Amino acid sequence: MITAVLSGNASPDLEQVLGELLRNPLVRNAVFLQSSGTPVSRLRCETRVCDGPLCGETWNALLAGSAASYILFVPDAGGVRPDLRAPERLLEAAEAAGASMVYADYAERTGGDLRERPLIDCQLGSLRDGFDFGPLILISTAAARQALRRYGKVPPFRWAGWYDLRLKLSTDRLPLRLPERLAIVDADRGEAAGHFAYVDPANRAPQEEMEQAVTAHLKRIGAFLEPGFLDVPRAAGPFPVEASVIIPVKNRVWTVADAVKSALAQKPDFAFNVIVVDNHSTDGTTALVADLAERSPSLVHIVPKRKDLSIGGCWNEAIFSAACGRYAVQLDSDDLYREGALQRLADLMRGQNCAMAVGSYTLVNERLEEIPPGLVDHREWTEANGRNNALRINGLGAPRAFDTALLRHVGFPNVGYGEDYAVSLRLSREYRIGRIFESLYLCRRWEGNTDASPSVEQMNRYDLYKDRLRTLEIRARRKMNGVRGWRS
C-alpha cells in the first residue's frame, strides 16, 4: 500500500532506515531521491536522480508513476529512526479520517537523551513555507492526483515544488496531525534554516518561488487581495505632538536608557515625545526611567494600573493616552534608533498616505557590533503583492510607525509575541504599508532577549498563535472578496 520516498545523504544510517521500512509488510517499495550532480548511490531500492525533494518535477513524476495507495515521504532520512509501527499508525489515521496527508510528532536524540518534539496542528493559516511536518509524512496518492487534476500540476519550481503540492493538498482538506511520537531524530544531523533565512539575499530565488506558490493558493481559496488601497481617514481632533516613540519595557535596566536616549536624540522638523510604558519592572528600570523623565520634558513615563498586561497591552496604554502623537513609532527597549530614523518614517507616512511604515534594521550584539545576517530589509516586499505574501512570512520588519487614529480603532491584542504582526495584517487588508529599505535601527541580540533560545513548547505557542492570526485574516479577506463557505 505504501511507497517510501527518502531523501538525504546516502549513509549507513539511511541504509538502516531503508531496511527497516522495507521489512514492514505495508511498504511495497522504496525510492531514493538522489540530487543531480552527485554520485548515484547504491542503496537497495530504486534511485532517481533529480533536483531534490523540493522540486516540482520530482513530485509530478512520483505521483504519475506511483502504483501505491500512499507515499511515505522522509525528507531527510539520515539520522531518522522511525517507530517500527509508524507506517501502520499513519495509515490507520489516514484511512479513519479520510486524510490527504498525515504527519506525527517525534523526538530528538542527543547522546543517550531524548527530547520530545511535539508539532502543532495544521490550520487554514498554516502558510509558512517552513511549517514543520516532522520526519515522516504520509500522502494519499489518490488525493494528491485529484488535487493536481483540479488545481494544475506542480509548476517547474526548483525549491517550492513540495510547498506548492502541500498547499494544493490542503485546499480541500487540511493535513492531519497524529499527536504521537513516531520517530527519533539525531539532533546533530544538521540545523534547520535560520530565523532570518528568508531575508538572506542568497535565498532570493527560492523565496520568489515560495511567493508564487502562496499567491496562487490565496487566489484558489478566494483570499487574494488585488492591488488597491483605501485612503487613510483624516484624524479628528488635534494631537499633542506629531509623533510619539513607544517603548514598552519590563526589567531592562541595562538597555532601556540607551533606547530612550537614541529616541530623544532624534532631530526631526516636528514636535515629538517618547512614551515609556513601564510594566511594573522589579530590577531598577522604574527608578531609572523616572529619573530620565525628570530631566527630559519630552519623556512620558507610564506605569499601568493593571498588572496583567503583555507587550500588546502596554502598547494600548500608550496609544490611548492623551500624550500620544499623530504617529506612534515602535522602539524596543533593547534597541537603538539611527540618526534621522524618526524623520524618515514620518515623511513616508505623510507622503504616501500610509497607515503604517516599516524601515529596515541591522542586527548587532550587545557591543553594537554587526552580526549575521547584518541588514534585515525585507526586500521581498512589493506594493502589489506584499500584503498577500505577508501571510507566508513571520513578520514585516522594524522599526514600525502607525497612524494613531487607525491604531486606536484596531487596537493591539494583549499578547507578548505576534502583537505587531496581528496589527500589520489587519491594516494591510485595506491600507497601504510603506517601506524603507535602508537601515534605521540597531536590533540588539543578547542572551536576555525575549526571543533568545525559546523552548520547543514556547515556539509552538508562538507559531500556533501566528497561524491562528493568519487563519482569521484569511477568513476576513475571503469575506471581503464575497467568498462564502469553506470546504475543510
Image (spheres, rainbow, N blue to C red):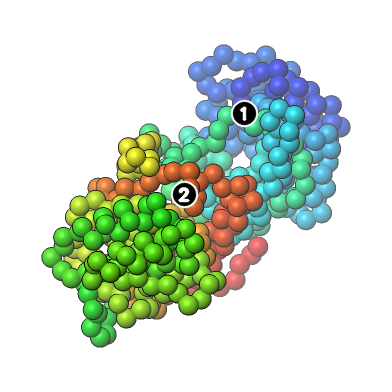
User: What quarter of the picture does the N terminus occupy?
Assistant: top right
Where is mark 1, residue-wise? 188
Amino acid carrying label 1: it is Asp
Mark 1, residues whose alpha carbon is within 10 Å: few (<14), some, or many (≥20)? few
User: Which label's residue is closer to the chain start, 1 or 2?
Assistant: 1
Secondary structure of residue under mark 2? loop
Q: Which mark is residue 92?
A: none
Q: Viewer-nearest of labels 1 and 2?
A: 2
Q: Nearer the viewer, residue 193 or 296?
A: 296
Amino acid carrying label 2: it is Asn
Where is mark 2, residue-wise? 449
- Residue 108 in picture, x, y percent from top left: 69, 36
Q: Residue at x 70, y 17 (%)?
A: 12
Q: Residue at x 29, y 64 (%)?
A: 292
Q: Are marks 1 and 2 in contact (CB under 8 Å)?
A: no
Whether residue 227 is situated above or below residue 438 in the rendered picture = below
Whether residue 190 is situated above or below residue 333 in the rendered picture = above
Tell me the quarter of the picture where residue 185 sits: top right
